[in-house]
Amino acid sequence: MTLGALSRVELQQRLAGAGLLLPCGPFVVRLRTRSAEIVEGLQRLYRDFPLMPEGGFVDFEVEVRPPGLARRFLRPQVGFYCDGRAPFKPLPRHQAFPMLEWGLNWVISTHAHDHLVLHAAVLERDGRALLLSADPGSGKSTLCAGLVHAGWRLLSDELALLELSSGRVRPVARPISLKNESIEVVRGLGDEVELSAVCADTTKGAVAHMRPPADSVARRAEMALPAWLVFPRFTRGGQLSVEPVGKAHAFMEMVRHAFNYGFLGASAFDALADLIERSETFRAGYGSLTQILPEIDRLTAADRS
């Protein structure tokens, strides 16, 4: 049974009462909220997620609620709480769903220390993983959405969890975060693309999320070995440019994109060195998805052959 089997009233009752258990990468979180924005977002984007039974182990108690009584009425705000503490400042109430998504990313990135946590999107084809790592604003999530639409399996939009013991990437198949112009680019991929309502005036501008494919959610336990690492860079009106990246340079670049490299020490060095050694590494500049998507297929097909 999936979340989509619940009516809106049933979902509201669960969230306001005992809470809803959600798989979140390697963790299970219990979510409680009365936010109508989150109810709508869950119904639209999480409907393929399983309804996990009560009584199992819960890693974190998560709540999105007003920070105080006054904030229910005067300039209404919501806060994100994990196990009773608030890691962020409150945000305006209409930003409740993006805040939940950002908060769940924080939960994973600050606690998944049996993995090397990297800022990267991850996709899979034929059992092999493609990692996309870049600074914010480089088009990583837009490219991730385009590849998902082209048939790649989504493992993660934001966080690559590299298992220390095996070198495989653990899926975190959740909604893909899109910002500003990329929202309409992804909406234009086809009628089957489903997006949340656009949330305006956040610190990142306009924000929306894309529903992960049902197959990616169903296969959320299937890990994959890294095979390709691409550093994408979107430039409006830019030309396609793809070039190999040296292993030493790729290693140092990924150290910069690692959340817990210093915390893990030698284990992180070994895991990252293994990732770089087994992966073909490229830098890709482009001005549109129509430029880069066929090139990604060409690069990965050549490697597979």
Image: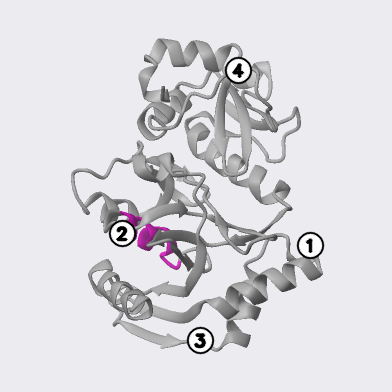
N-term-proximal mark, 1 vs 2 = 2
Query: On the image, which quarter does residue 82 sit in?
Result: top right
Quadrant where the N terminus lies?
A: top left
The crowding category of the residue bearing disc 2, from other C-alpha atoms within 10 Å (few below 14, some 14 to 19, many at least 20), is some
Q: Secondary structure at mark 2?
A: helix
The residue type indicated by label 4 comes to Glu
Residue 266 location, x and y as percent? 80, 70
Which region is colored magenta?
A: 138-148
N-term-proximal mark, 4 vs 1 = 4
N-term-proximal mark, 2 vs 4 = 4
Q: Residue at image x 45%, y 26%?
A: 37
Residue 133 location, x and y as percent? 51, 68
The residue type indicated by label 1 comes to Leu
The colour scheme applied to this rendered structure is: one colour
Q: Which residue position holds label 3?
A: 245
Q: Residue at image x 73%, y 67%?
A: 268
The residue type indicated by label 3 comes to Val
Q: Which residue position holds label 1?
A: 264
Whether tag 4 and tag 1 are in contact, CB under 8 A, the answer is no
Q: Please, what is the dominant secondary structure of the magenta stretch? A: helix
Whether tag 3 and tag 4 are in contact, CB under 8 A, the answer is no
